[in-house]
Image (spheres, coloured by chain):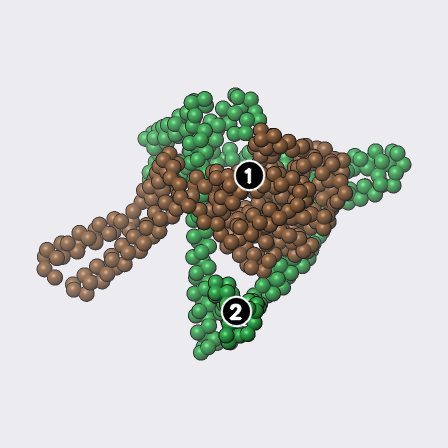
Chain colours: A brown, B green
Amino acid sequence: MNGSQQDISTGWERWLERFVALDRRWIFLVLGSVVVLFLVVPVSMPVTVSEQVRAMYETIEALPPGARVHLSIDYGPGSEAELWPQHIAILRQLLEKDCKVICSSLWTDGPPMIEKAFTVVVGQLEREGKKKVRGVDYVNLGFKAGDRVAIAKIGSSFKGAFPTDYQGNPTANLPIMQGWDTYRDIDLLITIAVGDPGAVEYIQQAQSRYGMRMVAGVTAVISPQLYPYYQSRNLLGFVGGLAGAAEYEKLVGRPGYATRGMFIQSAVHILIVGLVLAGNAAQFWLWWLRRRKGARV
Amino acid sequence: MTGTYGPFMETLGVWLVCFFTLAVFSFLYRDNPIYKAVEHIYVGVAAGYYFYQAFRGTIYPNFVLHIHRGFQAMAEGKMDGYLAQWRWGAAVLGLLLLSRLIPKLGWLSRWPMALVVGSFAALNLTGFAKANFIDQVAGTMLPLASAMSGPEALPFWPGAKAAAPSILNNAVLVVGVVTVLTYFFFSTRRAGLLGAMGNVGIWFVMITFGATYGSIVLARISLLIGRATTLLDVNLPKYGYPAYFCALLVVGCILVWRLKFFKGEQER
């Protein structure tokens, strides 16, 4: 290797070393900038509906008016970004179909999310001339501690597990709670969940025990765990993360927050894949340059 | 914001949302006093909130209210009132859990703990056995051709129709289950056919890890989009552009700390 070749090699090496040791805060800054850029300048992209999301939509669509649905809201504000769009789309679909929606939560921060969703969806429906009454068409039973034990207790007696609703009214007196008490009287179980207790616990303690029809909305982190249960028909369908929510919004014909986030999500993913590839290529190149230099010295 | 509060509380809420979000994001620069303060506030508020919800959702309706109604029924001479009193037993067991706070009486907590562990294990065992074992085994017994007759029937399998995607999916699933189970079969040396199957199995495991990691990235970016959307959506003139002012406040505080109080040596 002559002098000029060695200089070029050293120059590349120095540049690659700097790239490989790049301060990760630059990556955070670029990621944040991409997100803000495409929020300010929205770009739409086509959304393709996956099989499990369509199956969930069709399961809910097949419910007759007046069907009893237990909607367990097992997430808090920390997962609102992913689960709120699903929550709103599913709740609206249920109330539009005149289902009786019985909400509860295994997470302490779930009941306020239930209240917030009722405020939004019932308000929207009222403005469209469809009045829904608390205690008749829907109810918030609140939080129940006990994880799996709580699910088993709810399944054997709703009124026993929840003597009062979130507002403090005795559940035995509510019109929506008349004439039934166990999971055998529920037409569909839906959980919108972020972790444990959540979808897997409901499958184990409620679906498999009572042979119920069940669907779920979960975060993207949880969704890979649910494919085996979908395959074995424990779950009739499920929605995973913001991408799943965007697909669901397409099915219900009301594009919203999740659809808006899809292009940003794709742009950031392309950026991350590009960075992973570039980082690996730089590492290999550096290794090759050093190996070649070592062999020549 | 759902508009269930007055305008002042709504504006205050919006400002707090912006400030706390940006203060937590400031950790991306480096650990700093603003982040630390917000972290401590969050832990304190969360602990108080969880205690309140646990009391409101469980202790009050399932114990306090129940016992109160029991006394009322007892006063009326009803049998239900006496039956309601068994919940005192559950309350005593619950209190015994707190005996761990007194070292000499700590052993008393083992009784309620035994009850919790026993019931939890029994419930888990039955639910797990059905959903995670029996149903999964049944779910893996898949046809490699759907049983249908007609003109599209496969020539080499009368009465079966070629449903290419589902046959392929089923085949991948069965091969994946068998080879991954082979990989985790430790009772004999993996060589020959077993070794080859184990090698295929490890590829399935690696692809699963990759898919899971991809889902985690998807989830984390969704959270970032969620916070950024909130910041932009509430950054309105009617609230006084809280995102801009809170960003300036957080950056200003970090600058002051960095220039006046930051001791690089200590931090290293």
Nearer to us of marks 2 and 1 is 2
Give the total number of marks visible in the rendering.
2
Badge 2: few (under 14), some or many (20 or more) residues near its Cα, within 10 Å? few
Three-letter code for the amino acid on which mark 2 is drawn: Pro
Q: Is B229 placed left or right of A293 in the picture?
A: right
Q: Residue furthest bottom?
A: B192
Answer whether residue B181 is visible to the viewer in this image.
Answer: no
* Residue B229, quarter of picture: top left
Q: Position of residue A147 (x, y in %)?
A: 64, 48
Which numbered marker is on residue B172? none
Q: Residue furthest right?
A: B77
Residue ID at (51%, 52%): A223
Q: Position of residue B49 (x, y in %)?
A: 59, 35
Tell which of B164 and B255 is nearer to you. B164
* Residue A132, quarter of picture: top right
Residue behind mark 1? A88
Q: Position of residue B204 (x, y in %)?
A: 45, 64
SS at circle 1:
helix
SS at circle 2:
loop
Label 1 marks a residue whose chain is A
Distance between the alpha carbons at the discs numbered 2 and 1? 46 Å
Residue ID at (69%, 40%): B58
Q: Position of residue B20 (x, y in %)?
A: 46, 32
State the quadrant of the C terminus of chain A: bottom left
Residue behind mark 2? B151
Residue ID at (59%, 33%): A125
Three-letter code for the amino acid on which mark 1 is drawn: Ile
Answer whether residue A90 is visible to the viewer in this image.
Answer: yes
